[in-house]
Image: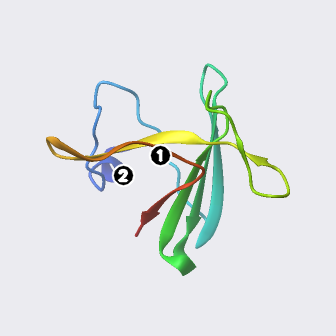
């Protein structure tokens, strides 16, 4: 990532490498596979003003939505020194833009 791009972000976990992805469309899905093979999907949906996140390889037992089993995973919500959202199993995390 060039210095011009880096200055546009408030980076955290600076001790780790950072990869920059530029969306080409207003609504776009990005798939990530970690080095250990874990799969994460991020869907940027600007028309709904949100970003959806799914984690596909959680050890939590999937739940049925009637048609198929849906992976569950745990989230935690942090706000500076507090944890207003404790460990919570979900099927999709949504970040409002």
Give 41 or 78, whichever is nearer the viewer. 78
- Along the horizontal axis of the image, is 32 left or right of 68? left
- Expressed as whole percent of the image width and height from the top left, the position of residue 68 reads 83, 51
**In this view, which residue lies farthest toward the left?**
81
Whole-number angstrom distance, CA of label 2 to CA of label 1: 8 Å
Q: Residue at x 58, y 73 (%)?
A: 26
Image depth: mark 2 or mark 1 in front: 1
Q: Which residue is mark 1?
A: 20
- Expressed as whole percent of the image width and height from the top left, the position of residue 77 reads 32, 47
Q: Quadrant of the N terminus?
A: top left
Q: Residue at x 29, y 32 (%)?
A: 13
Mark number displayed over residue 5: 2
Q: Residue at x 47, y 46 (%)?
A: 20
- Expressed as whole percent of the image width and height from the top left, the position of residue 7 reads 26, 51
In the depicted structure, whether residue 48 falls above or below residue 89 = below
Reading the chain from its start, which is encountered first: label 2 or label 1?
2
Give 78 or 39, whichever is nearer the viewer. 78
Mark number displayed over residue 50: none
In the depicted structure, whether residue 46 falls above or below residue 81 = below
Give 10 or 64, whichever is nearer the viewer. 64
Q: Secondary structure at mark 1?
A: loop
- Expressed as whole percent of the image width and height from the top left, the position of residue 32 reads 62, 39
* Mark 2 in CB contact with mark 1 (< 8 angstroms): yes
- Along the horizontal axis of the image, is 14 left or right of 41? left
Q: Secondary structure at mark 2?
A: helix
Give 6 or 76, whichever is nearer the viewer. 76
Is residue 1 visible in the rendered image? The answer is: no
Q: Quadrant of residue 45?
A: bottom right
Is residue 23 visible in the rendered image? The answer is: yes
Disc count in the image?
Answer: 2
What coloring was used for the rendering? Answer: rainbow
In the depicted structure, whether residue 73 falls above or below residue 70 = above
């Amino acid at each position: 990532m060039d210095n011009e791009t880096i200055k546009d972000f408030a980076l955290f976990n600076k001790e780790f490498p950072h990869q920059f992805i530029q969306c080409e469309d207003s609504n776009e899905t990005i798939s990530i596979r970690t080095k250990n093979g874990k799969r994460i999907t991020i869907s940027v949906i600007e028309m709904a003003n949100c970003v959806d996140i799914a984690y596909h390889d959680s050890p939590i037992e999937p739940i049925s939505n009637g048609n198929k089993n849906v992976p569950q995973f745990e989230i935690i919500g942090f706000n500076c020194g507090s944890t207003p959202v404790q460990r919570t199993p979900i099927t999709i995390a949504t970040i409002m833009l």
